[in-house]
Structure formats: structure tokens, C-alpha cells
Image (cartoon, helix red, strand yellow):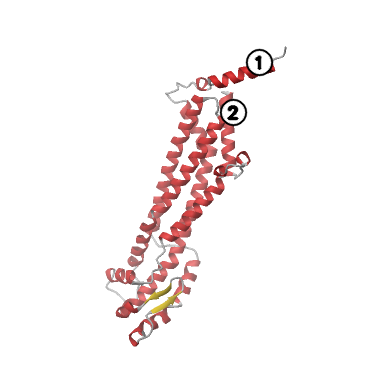
Amino acid sequence: MTAFMQILGSTKESLRKILVRGEFDEYLDDAEMHCTVRMAEMLEKYTKQLQLNSDESTKDNFLMEEIAVLEETKLIGLPNFLPRTAFLTILQRKLKKISGTPIELVEEVWNYVENVVVRVVIFHSEGYLQLQNSFRRASHNLILKMRDRSVDRVKEMVEMEKLADYTCDPEYMSSWNSLMAQQDSFITAIKRVSLGYAKEFDINGYGEVEIGHLKDYLLIVEQAFDLKMRITAYWKIVLKRMLDNLALHLLFNVQNLVNKEMEAEIINEMMGSNHSGSIERLLEESPSLASRREKLNKSIRLP
């Protein structure tokens, strides 16, 4: 039992160092085991991927999606009121488009964590083959459960974002006001298209966009522009909130894996019916290790 607790303790301490504290003195020349750096790189990669997947800076058909949605969400009521349904419709489309990216991130992180855990387990249980197999099996089962838990959490985050348009972040209003400052000159440019003026307009955040097609939608183009700028300002908040929550979720659960759940899972595996509660049997040394130990004992035996 003492040997078992020593192996478990040394395994946990190594994992705390490389997965939680970012210390990699045990694996100085093995970059794959510099875990906090590798996980930070994964998050950075998926941050860029998320932004790329949601990029809609197209020059053609500018505002046409917003116009189509506004036409389909008309209500009997006062003019110039943006239907909340229109906002949520476009928001939900954008969320659906990027919903697979955060799932890919959590799956990649947990696959990486599993590989790291297995390597550490193998190192610290070297010579105890049956124990090693039990450790690996327990680690695999636990990380599988934690991966599924993370995927469920990501899906829940996306569904929550679909449900309501809310933020207490003042950046939303400042960003929206900044974007809306361009509205008057944008509308004026559309009206001048019929007079032979330019059919392009430079919009902050989108670059130069085509506006010639919008001259036929002057009655609704103001609302469409407002809707797009609201979505643009709010989408920055959504992405930032999603990435922050995702990073915190992964950090918390990796730490929880090392500090709490791994030990409990390994002990449950060891005490399972397959082993009839016999840890001692699993601690039997492999023949090669027993042979090396015997040779060592003989070499240091006093004459």
C-alpha cells in the first residue's frame, strides 16, 4: 500500500507542476510536456479561428441579410422600431455558424491532457505493469467523462447566448455609438448613387463596401444599418465572453482533474470488482524489475 500511495503521490505532483503551475523542469527538453504554454497556444489558435469563422466583411450584398430579416419580422406598430426578433434571428445564425469551433477546442485540449497524463503515469509506475494498466484505464475513463462534460458546457454556453441579448459591458454602447456616427454620411452616399456618384462607401470595421444596390431600399436601409451596427458591437462582446468562459472552464477542470478527481477515479478502479480489492497483487514487480532489484541487492551486499 505504501508503494501505491508513493506512486500516486508522485504522479499527482508531476501533473500539478506541468498542468497547473507551468513548471517543466522534469521535461526541460520535451516541448510537448510544457503544458500551460501548449494549452495557451491552442486557445490562441481557436480564438483566431473563431474570429475568422464569424468574419462577414464582404463587399457585396452589404446589408441585404439585415433587410431580408427586417422584412420578415415586420410588426403592426410604430415605424423606426427595431424588432428584437430581427436582432435575435441574425445573432442565432452567427452562433450556429461558429458553434462547432469551441467544441473542437475542448476536444483538442482534453486529448492533449490525456496524452500528458498517460506519459506521466507510465513514468511513475514503471515496473508495475498491472498497476500501470489500472492507472491508464482510470485516467482514460476520467478524461472521457471530463471531455463530455466540457462539450456539454460549450453547448450550454452557445444556447445561453442564443436565448437573450444582454451585456453589462459599457464597451457595447461605445462601440455601437462609434459605428452609428457613420450612418448619416452612409445614407447620403446611397442617395447620391442615382446622381452618378460612387457606388462604394468606406465603413469603419468593414472597409469599402458596395452600396449601389441599396438605392432601392431607402425606406428600410436606416433600420438595416442600425441593426448591423448593433450586431457588430454586440458580437465582439459575445466572442470575448465565450472565450473567457471557455478558458476559465478548462483551467478549473484541469486543476480539478489533478487535485481531486484523478485520485478518486484511480482508487475506484483499483477497488473495483475486477481486482477484488487487492492492491497488493497489482504491486507485484515485473520479472525484469525484480531481476534488476536482486542484482542491485547482491552488488551492495556486504562480504
In this rendering, is residue 191 above or below 26?
A: below
Is residue 79 visible to the viewer in this orientation of the structure?
Answer: no
Q: CA distance from mark 1 to mark 2?
A: 25 Å
Residue at point 43%, 60% (across, down) = 52
Residue 6: mark in rendering: 2
Q: Nearer the viewer, mark 1 or mark 2?
A: 1
Question: In which quadrant is the C terminus drawn?
Answer: top right
Labels 1 and 2: the sequence-earlier one: 2
Is residue 73 visible to the viewer in this orientation of the structure?
Answer: yes
Question: In which quadrant is the N terminus drawn?
Answer: top right
Residue highlighted by disc 1 = 298
Residue at point 60%, 20% (across, down) = 292
Decide if residue 273 is on the left or right side of residue 260: left
State the residue lying farthest toward the right: 303
Q: Position of residue 23 (x, y in %)?
A: 61, 43
SS at mark 2 in the image: helix
Decide if residue 236 is on the left or right side of residue 85: right
Amino acid type at image mark 1: Lys
Amino acid type at image mark 2: Gln
Q: Position of residue 56 (x, y in %)?
A: 39, 66
In this rendering, is residue 162 above or below 128?
A: below
SS at mark 1 in the image: helix
Mark 1 Cα-neighbour bin, 10 Å: few <14, some 14–19, many ≥20: few
Q: Position of residue 11 (x, y in %)?
A: 56, 34
- Nearest the viewer among 147 and 79 is 147
Q: Quadrant of residue 166?
A: bottom left
Mark 2 Cα-neighbour bin, 10 Å: few <14, some 14–19, many ≥20: few
Q: So how many labels did they put on this image?
A: 2
Residue at point 47%, 25% (across, down) = 271
- Nearest the viewer among 261 and 137 is 137
Q: Quadrant of residue 238?
A: bottom left
